[in-house]
Amino acid sequence: MFAELATAWEAARQSALREARGGERRRAEGAGRKPKLVFLDRLLPLVHLRHQLPHVVLAELFEVDRSTVSAAIRQVRPLPAARGFAVPDRPGLRLKTLEDVFAYAEAEGVELRLDGAETQVRRPQADRPGRRAFVSGKRKQNTIKTTTFSDGQGRLLLSGLVRPGRMPDQTAVRSEGIAEQFRTRPGVKAKVDSGYLGLAKEFPGQVSAPAKKPKDGACDGDKHAWRETRRRQSSARICVEHTNAELRQWAPLRRFTGRRDTYAETHLTVAPLVSDRSAQRATRRRTSTELVLVRDTVR
């Protein structure tokens, strides 16, 4: 990753210097003020994102001024955010958009899992337009919502689609065109929770959501069948919850204390790092018991 980011950082740095000069350099290469931090040390945003250490603490650790640390974080943070998400068993291939995920799922026969996640953020100032948009109806806090896509083993394929916390999970993915993706690629299937019942109704052969609870007057057999169906569906979908838990190991994705307008970039910096680790897990073959469960579910 260091070699990958170093090339992109140097290209961006030379482009910025050329724009500031207004043309080609006038002095020999190597002249001029030297940066206080070499590029390897400029990867300190990863330390900041892992533990959410204050800039002042990082400045003490690297023996530089706080402004130098803040500038390094601003400069380097967009580079990991543009890397994309690692693909299991496909080194060098990375997914960056929702279209990429659906194309991969169709080509490899991967059944997707998707789920929404919320991160607490700072409360907007009073009388600011759109303040209520961040108040989550579920958590009763100011949050930002993201959507996570994984495969059947919980390996992260995409995480993003950043929206204010008040927006429902289904609305967030529909605004990114997920319905068009299901129509374009009818072979792609997904398992979801009850927050995506509208998608399950629109695409009954592709999207699997929990069954509705029987009415109070239903017989015991119907209630037992509902509980068993819901248990199997939850068991097959729980892996995406584990994927969200991996993201929560990074402090800023548990509670973000920075400016809300930088959260999307911060999230896209952290999530690909999580996908790099999850993609290294070997593909697990289904056991005979799991194959029987799949067969019974299809029936």
Image (cartoon, grey):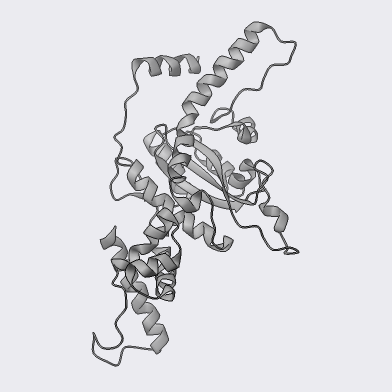
Q: Is 242 rendered above or below residue 130?
A: above
In screen coordinates, is 107 left or right of 134? left
Q: Percent position (x, y) of residue 58?
A: 39, 66
- Residue located at (51% from left, 48% from top): 254
Q: Quadrant of residue 12?
A: bottom left
- Residue located at (69% from left, 16% from top): 214
Q: Quadrant of residue 36?
A: bottom left
| Foreground pick, 255 / 226 | 255
| Foreground pick, 294 / 202 | 294
Q: Percent position (x, y) of residue 82?
A: 41, 59
- Residue located at (58% from left, 60% from top): 260
| Residue farthest along the bottom direction in this orientation | 26
Is residue 16 in view from this perspective? yes
Q: Percent position (x, y) of residue 109?
A: 40, 33
Is residue 95 in view from this perspective? no
Q: Is 33 rendered above or below residue 207?
A: below
Q: Quadrant of the N terminus?
A: bottom left
In screen coordinates, is 189 left or right of 214? left
Q: Percent position (x, y) of residue 295?
A: 44, 15
In screen coordinates, is 36 left or right of 160? left
> How many labels sit on residues?
0
Q: Quadrant of residue 220?
A: top right
Q: Is 3 rendered above or below residue 134?
A: below
